[in-house]
Amino acid sequence: MAFQFASDGLMRMVSGGGPGDRSLYMKLPLDDVRFHWKFFDKEAFLEGSLEVEIHGATGRDTVLTVFRDGEISPDWHPIDSQRGEGEIYFGFIGEVEVWTHRRDSVVVRLHAARDLEGIGRYEEAVLPEGSYEASASYSILTGHPRFRLFSQPSEPRAYIGCWRSKWEMELSGEPGWTGTRGEPEDSRFLARLAQMMPSVGAEQGTDGSRCAS
Protein backbone atom coordinates (compact mmCIF):
# COMPACT_ATOMS: atom_id res chain seq x y z
CA MET A 1 0.00 0.00 0.00
CA ALA A 2 2.77 2.45 0.94
CA PHE A 3 4.67 1.57 -2.25
CA GLN A 4 1.54 2.14 -4.34
CA PHE A 5 0.95 5.52 -2.68
CA ALA A 6 4.55 6.57 -3.33
CA SER A 7 4.35 5.35 -6.93
CA ASP A 8 1.15 7.30 -7.56
CA GLY A 9 2.69 10.39 -6.00
CA LEU A 10 5.76 10.14 -8.24
CA MET A 11 3.54 9.71 -11.30
CA ARG A 12 1.61 12.86 -10.50
CA MET A 13 4.78 14.81 -9.81
CA VAL A 14 6.18 13.89 -13.22
CA SER A 15 2.99 14.21 -15.28
CA GLY A 16 1.48 17.12 -13.39
CA GLY A 17 -1.51 17.26 -11.14
CA GLY A 18 -1.62 20.67 -9.53
CA PRO A 19 -4.85 22.70 -9.51
CA GLY A 20 -5.70 24.66 -12.63
CA ASP A 21 -7.70 24.83 -15.85
CA ARG A 22 -7.88 21.62 -17.90
CA SER A 23 -9.85 20.04 -20.70
CA LEU A 24 -11.82 16.89 -19.86
CA TYR A 25 -11.65 13.30 -21.14
CA MET A 26 -14.33 10.79 -20.20
CA LYS A 27 -15.58 7.33 -21.11
CA LEU A 28 -18.98 6.33 -19.75
CA PRO A 29 -18.91 3.87 -16.82
CA LEU A 30 -20.41 0.90 -18.66
CA ASP A 31 -19.98 -2.29 -16.67
CA ASP A 32 -17.53 -4.93 -17.89
CA VAL A 33 -16.34 -2.97 -20.94
CA ARG A 34 -12.70 -3.50 -21.96
CA PHE A 35 -11.21 -0.38 -23.54
CA HIS A 36 -13.76 0.30 -26.27
CA TRP A 37 -17.50 0.39 -26.87
CA LYS A 38 -19.72 1.94 -29.49
CA PHE A 39 -23.46 2.40 -29.75
CA PHE A 40 -25.06 1.37 -33.02
CA ASP A 41 -27.53 4.27 -33.28
CA LYS A 42 -26.01 7.72 -32.80
CA GLU A 43 -29.34 9.50 -33.23
CA ALA A 44 -31.03 7.34 -30.58
CA PHE A 45 -28.14 7.93 -28.18
CA LEU A 46 -28.25 11.71 -28.65
CA GLU A 47 -32.03 11.84 -28.13
CA GLY A 48 -31.31 11.76 -24.41
CA SER A 49 -28.86 13.89 -22.47
CA LEU A 50 -25.46 13.73 -20.81
CA GLU A 51 -24.30 16.08 -18.07
CA VAL A 52 -21.08 16.41 -16.09
CA GLU A 53 -21.15 18.11 -12.69
CA ILE A 54 -17.87 18.91 -10.96
CA HIS A 55 -18.02 19.59 -7.23
CA GLY A 56 -14.83 21.52 -6.73
CA ALA A 57 -12.64 20.86 -3.71
CA THR A 58 -12.06 24.60 -3.42
CA GLY A 59 -15.75 25.49 -3.62
CA ARG A 60 -16.00 25.95 -7.38
CA ASP A 61 -18.88 23.90 -8.80
CA THR A 62 -19.24 23.50 -12.56
CA VAL A 63 -22.10 21.96 -14.56
CA LEU A 64 -21.44 21.04 -18.21
CA THR A 65 -23.91 19.71 -20.77
CA VAL A 66 -22.26 17.29 -23.20
CA PHE A 67 -25.37 16.75 -25.34
CA ARG A 68 -29.12 17.22 -25.13
CA ASP A 69 -32.09 16.66 -27.45
CA GLY A 70 -30.03 15.50 -30.40
CA GLU A 71 -27.31 18.15 -30.28
CA ILE A 72 -23.73 17.82 -29.00
CA SER A 73 -22.52 20.98 -27.28
CA PRO A 74 -19.98 22.97 -29.36
CA ASP A 75 -17.18 22.47 -26.82
CA TRP A 76 -17.54 18.67 -26.81
CA HIS A 77 -16.94 15.92 -29.36
CA PRO A 78 -16.94 12.09 -29.31
CA ILE A 79 -13.56 10.44 -28.93
CA ASP A 80 -12.29 9.57 -32.39
CA SER A 81 -12.39 5.82 -32.84
CA GLN A 82 -13.22 3.40 -35.63
CA ARG A 83 -16.98 3.18 -36.04
CA GLY A 84 -19.48 2.61 -38.80
CA GLU A 85 -21.84 5.13 -40.31
CA GLY A 86 -24.50 6.20 -37.82
CA GLU A 87 -22.59 4.82 -34.80
CA ILE A 88 -21.06 6.72 -31.89
CA TYR A 89 -18.23 5.98 -29.44
CA PHE A 90 -18.97 5.89 -25.70
CA GLY A 91 -16.45 8.57 -24.72
CA PHE A 92 -16.18 12.34 -25.08
CA ILE A 93 -13.56 15.08 -24.92
CA GLY A 94 -14.47 18.53 -23.66
CA GLU A 95 -12.28 21.24 -25.15
CA VAL A 96 -13.56 23.94 -22.81
CA GLU A 97 -11.12 24.29 -19.92
CA VAL A 98 -12.52 24.05 -16.40
CA TRP A 99 -10.86 24.49 -13.02
CA THR A 100 -9.71 21.16 -11.63
CA HIS A 101 -8.26 19.96 -8.34
CA ARG A 102 -7.21 16.44 -7.41
CA ARG A 103 -9.81 16.29 -4.62
CA ASP A 104 -12.75 17.25 -6.87
CA SER A 105 -15.81 15.01 -6.96
CA VAL A 106 -17.44 14.41 -10.35
CA VAL A 107 -21.03 13.30 -11.03
CA VAL A 108 -22.09 12.14 -14.50
CA ARG A 109 -25.76 11.83 -15.46
CA LEU A 110 -27.00 10.11 -18.60
CA HIS A 111 -30.61 9.92 -19.76
CA ALA A 112 -31.21 7.20 -22.34
CA ALA A 113 -34.40 8.07 -24.21
CA ARG A 114 -34.69 4.49 -25.49
CA ASP A 115 -32.86 1.16 -25.27
CA LEU A 116 -29.36 1.60 -26.66
CA GLU A 117 -27.74 -1.33 -28.45
CA GLY A 118 -23.98 -1.49 -28.79
CA ILE A 119 -20.92 -3.66 -29.21
CA GLY A 120 -17.59 -4.11 -27.46
CA ARG A 121 -14.59 -6.41 -27.60
CA TYR A 122 -16.39 -9.51 -26.35
CA GLU A 123 -20.14 -9.05 -26.75
CA GLU A 124 -23.09 -7.02 -27.89
CA ALA A 125 -25.32 -5.59 -25.18
CA VAL A 126 -28.13 -3.14 -24.50
CA LEU A 127 -28.15 -0.21 -22.10
CA PRO A 128 -31.85 -0.08 -21.15
CA GLU A 129 -33.88 3.09 -21.45
CA GLY A 130 -33.73 5.16 -18.28
CA SER A 131 -31.70 7.63 -16.24
CA TYR A 132 -28.23 6.80 -14.93
CA GLU A 133 -25.88 8.50 -12.50
CA ALA A 134 -22.35 7.71 -11.36
CA SER A 135 -19.82 9.56 -9.23
CA ALA A 136 -16.09 9.57 -9.82
CA SER A 137 -12.79 11.22 -9.17
CA TYR A 138 -10.14 11.85 -11.78
CA SER A 139 -7.92 8.91 -12.67
CA ILE A 140 -5.09 11.31 -13.50
CA LEU A 141 -4.47 15.03 -14.01
CA THR A 142 -1.86 15.83 -16.64
CA GLY A 143 0.16 18.97 -17.12
CA HIS A 144 1.11 21.85 -14.87
CA PRO A 145 -1.55 24.49 -15.62
CA ARG A 146 -0.13 27.03 -13.18
CA PHE A 147 3.55 26.44 -13.94
CA ARG A 148 4.08 26.80 -17.67
CA LEU A 149 7.80 26.15 -17.26
CA PHE A 150 6.92 22.49 -16.70
CA SER A 151 4.15 22.30 -19.31
CA GLN A 152 4.11 19.35 -21.66
CA PRO A 153 3.54 19.73 -25.42
CA SER A 154 -0.05 18.55 -24.99
CA GLU A 155 -2.59 20.62 -23.12
CA PRO A 156 -3.36 19.90 -19.45
CA ARG A 157 -6.17 17.36 -19.23
CA ALA A 158 -8.32 15.79 -16.53
CA TYR A 159 -9.25 12.14 -17.10
CA ILE A 160 -12.57 11.22 -15.49
CA GLY A 161 -12.08 7.51 -14.96
CA CYS A 162 -12.08 6.44 -11.30
CA TRP A 163 -15.73 5.44 -10.98
CA ARG A 164 -17.48 4.51 -7.74
CA SER A 165 -20.00 2.35 -9.62
CA LYS A 166 -20.77 1.12 -13.13
CA TRP A 167 -23.93 0.98 -15.25
CA GLU A 168 -25.13 -2.55 -15.95
CA MET A 169 -26.10 -3.58 -19.46
CA GLU A 170 -28.18 -6.49 -20.71
CA LEU A 171 -26.16 -8.96 -22.78
CA SER A 172 -27.72 -9.89 -26.11
CA GLY A 173 -25.87 -13.18 -26.54
CA GLU A 174 -24.17 -12.00 -29.71
CA PRO A 175 -20.33 -11.96 -29.79
CA GLY A 176 -18.27 -8.78 -29.97
CA TRP A 177 -15.85 -7.80 -32.71
CA THR A 178 -13.15 -10.22 -31.49
CA GLY A 179 -15.55 -13.03 -30.61
CA THR A 180 -16.28 -14.32 -27.13
CA ARG A 181 -14.04 -13.92 -24.10
CA GLY A 182 -10.59 -15.46 -24.33
CA GLU A 183 -8.68 -17.68 -21.95
CA PRO A 184 -7.95 -16.51 -18.38
CA GLU A 185 -4.39 -15.61 -19.36
CA ASP A 186 -5.75 -13.30 -22.06
CA SER A 187 -8.00 -11.65 -19.47
CA ARG A 188 -5.07 -11.15 -17.09
CA PHE A 189 -3.01 -9.58 -19.88
CA LEU A 190 -5.82 -7.18 -20.72
CA ALA A 191 -6.23 -6.27 -17.06
CA ARG A 192 -2.52 -5.41 -16.82
CA LEU A 193 -2.75 -3.41 -20.04
CA ALA A 194 -5.78 -1.51 -18.72
CA GLN A 195 -3.83 -0.41 -15.65
CA MET A 196 -1.46 1.48 -17.97
CA MET A 197 -4.29 3.50 -19.52
CA PRO A 198 -5.34 6.51 -17.42
CA SER A 199 -8.83 6.69 -18.87
CA VAL A 200 -9.88 3.13 -18.05
CA GLY A 201 -7.44 1.32 -15.81
CA ALA A 202 -6.95 3.38 -12.67
CA GLU A 203 -7.04 1.55 -9.36
CA GLN A 204 -6.97 4.73 -7.29
CA GLY A 205 -8.29 8.20 -7.99
CA THR A 206 -6.41 11.46 -7.61
CA ASP A 207 -8.29 11.98 -4.33
CA GLY A 208 -6.85 8.72 -2.96
CA SER A 209 -10.09 6.72 -3.17
CA ARG A 210 -10.36 3.24 -4.67
CA CYS A 211 -11.95 2.78 -8.08
CA ALA A 212 -14.66 0.26 -8.90
CA SER A 213 -13.30 -2.79 -10.69
Image: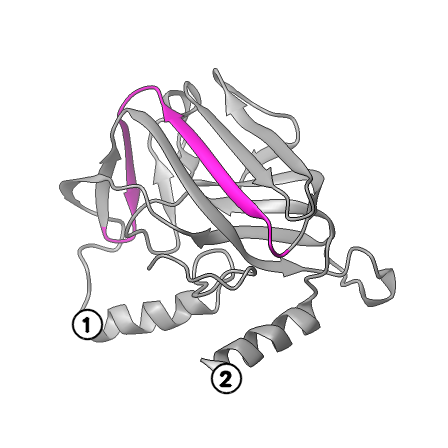
Report helix, strand or loop for mark 2.
Answer: helix
- Mark 1 residue element: helix
Q: Position of residue 129 (x, y in %)?
A: 27, 24
Q: Residue at point 50% right, 84% down? A: 3
Which mark, residue 166?
A: none
Residue 203 lies in quadrant: bottom left
| Mark 2 Cα-neighbour bin, 10 Å: few <14, some 14–19, many ≥20 | few
Q: Residue at x 28, y 73 (%)?
A: 188
Q: Where is residue 67? Give x, y as percent.
A: 52, 25
| Gap in angstroms between the C-alphas marked 1 and 2 | 27 Å
- Seen from the viewer's position, the closer of residues 182 and 162 is 162
Look at label 1 and name its amino acid.
Answer: Pro
Front label number (1 vs 2):
2
Does residue 155 appear left or right of residue 121 in this picture? Answer: right
Q: Is residue 38 visible?
A: yes
Q: Residues within 10 Å of mark 1 (few under 14, many from 20)?
A: few
Q: Nearer the viewer, residue 105 or 189?
A: 105
The residue most toward the top is: 69
Q: Which residue is mark 1?
A: 184
- Could you say which quadrant of the image residue 73 lies in? top right
Residue positioned most to the right? 149
The residue type indicated by label 2 comes to Phe
Q: Which residues are magenta?
A: 102-122
Residue 39 is one of the magenta-drawn residues: no
When the figure is inspected, residue 210 is found, relative to residue 41, above or below; the finding is: below
Q: Position of residue 163 (x, y in %)?
A: 42, 51
Q: Position of residue 112 (x, y in %)?
A: 35, 25
Q: Which mark is residue 3?
A: 2
**Farthest bottom residue?**
3
Give the tally of numbered discs. Answer: 2
From the viewer's perspective, tell me whether residue 198 is left or right of residue 124: right
